[in-house]
Amino acid sequence: MALIELSPETPAPPAPATPPPAYFYRRAGLALAALLLFALAGAAPPAATIWQRVGAVPVPASGDYQLIDGILYAMDLDAQPRTLTAWQAQPLRRLWSYRSSTNEDPFFVAEATPDITVVRAGRSVTVLDARTGAVRWTSPVAVQPVSDTVAYVEEEIFRPGTEYDPASGDPGQLYGTNSGSLHTEPARRTELRGLDLGTGTRRWTLSFPGSVFTAWTADPGNGVVVLSSDKLSLISPATGEVLRERPVPLLDGVRAEAGEVVGNTVLVHYGSFGTGGPVIAYALDTLAELWRQNRPDPAGNSSVCSGLLCVSKVEELVVLDPRTGADRWRIADTDLIAFGPDAVLELQGMTTPVRTADAGTGRPLIDLSPWQYQFPVQAGGAFLLSHLNRDRTTAFGLLRPGATEVQLLGRLPDMTVQCQAVPGVVACRVGDRVEVWAFRA
């Protein structure tokens, strides 16, 4: 406790000030420099904390790679048999290798979860343990995971003896959308089977006449959409229960031939998909009919519209209101990708970013012309942007939904246009290796 004496007397004047010794200034300067260093370090973190090299993985020139859910899969396509090697991306370390039982095309990782890795090799699928690479089970047809624990397979059943021989060169219409082979007659029926993704154990089986269109949707409903020749259904992937179902009408005696799920809307096409003709739109949550319209023939328009309801006309894309089918806005010579709930990404040739725009009106939002390439961030809703510099480096930025500008990340000291990204990690092909970098959003 400090005591202060109060005296009625006038205090003596202070002694005249004298200059402090020289060493005082040196110490004071050092202390001030240290304070400034700490202050600046807190206000502007070093770039290495935002953009940092993790390491590199060797990949043969004829090989390929995939970055999925934080795991980098390197594929040696010249090896006999073909080899898949899994690497943990951050910190970088080799996990395991798997040798395929076939050298047929294609060969790639179709899906991956923290528990399993689904490998497509030729017509078959092999499900591996994600931690060890050990084979858990195999399937002769494609497997569609719908969660970390559930998947379904779709198999067309044809009359025996109808398989087409390509060497014959016989004319005529051929059938077989997902069977891996062509047939001279339509499928008699299609079987859907729900499976336990970890073990391959069958959970349920449903049969539909002829061929079907299927698509899985996580929201709303967490179901498998099935369009058969006469009805539209929503199936529970866990139990096979029919959650909702409705008949699909004939239009001028023509049956529906193709389906498409865009956001919360199911589009049923009459006539061959992509050639124009009648379309009926249904709400995904209720399967109630929303609207009908006749689509024009796109007549060679190669523009892409992904995640949005669009009509391709001769020289433009028309963006539609999903609830009414009414025209919202139109644009020429540009590809569109849905970007968050309220925006779109405009591209040239599906590679070069142009701008972001309001999804409802087409009003420009962010100018992206300084950037040359875009790479979607898997499961992140964002896009990694890049451009090549004159000093032979590659600069990167991050475009996030709802952002008003691109966040600058850093540079890779090489030139590359082949990149893949997941939240927090980017992998880019540079010669015979894949460079792995971490970034902080």
Image (cartoon, rainbow, N blue to C red):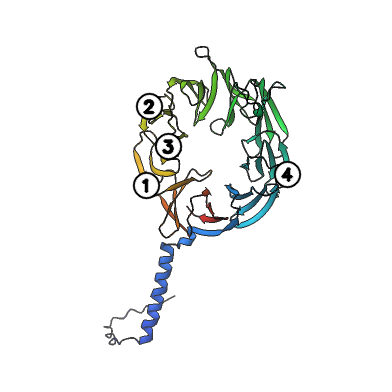
Specify whether 186 is left or right of 201.
Answer: left
Nearer to us of marks 1 and 4 is 1
Occupied quadrant, residue 324 = top left
**How far apart in space, not on screen, are marks 4 and 3 (Cα)?**
40 Å
Q: Which residue is mark 2?
A: 327
The reply to whether dot 1 and dot 4 touch (C-beta < 8 Å) is no
Type of residue at label 2?
Answer: Asp
Q: Amino acid at mark 4?
A: Val
| Label 1 sits on residue | 369
Residue that carries the numbered disc 3 in the rendered image: 335
Viewed as shown, does residue 264 lie left or right of 213?
left
At mark 4, the secondary structure is: strand
CA gap between label 1 and label 4 equals: 47 Å
Mark pair 2, 1: CA separation:
27 Å
Which residue is identified by label 4?
135
Amino acid beneath label 1? Ser
Mark 4 / mark 2, whichever is N-terminal: 4
| Towards the viewer: 286 or 135 | 135
Q: Nearer the viewer, mark 4 or mark 3?
A: 3
Q: Earlier in the sequence, mark 3 or mark 1?
A: 3
Residue 99 on image: x %, y %:
71, 47
* Closer-to-camera residue (261/283): 261
- Mark 2 lies on a secondary structure that is strand
Q: Is residue 79 visible?
A: yes
Q: Earlier in the sequence, mark 1 or mark 4?
A: 4
Please name the amino acid that badge 3 sits on.
Asp
Category of crowding for the residue at label 1, using alpha-carbon neighbours closer than 10 angstroms: few (below 14), some (14–19), many (at least 20): few
For mark 3, give the secondary structure: strand
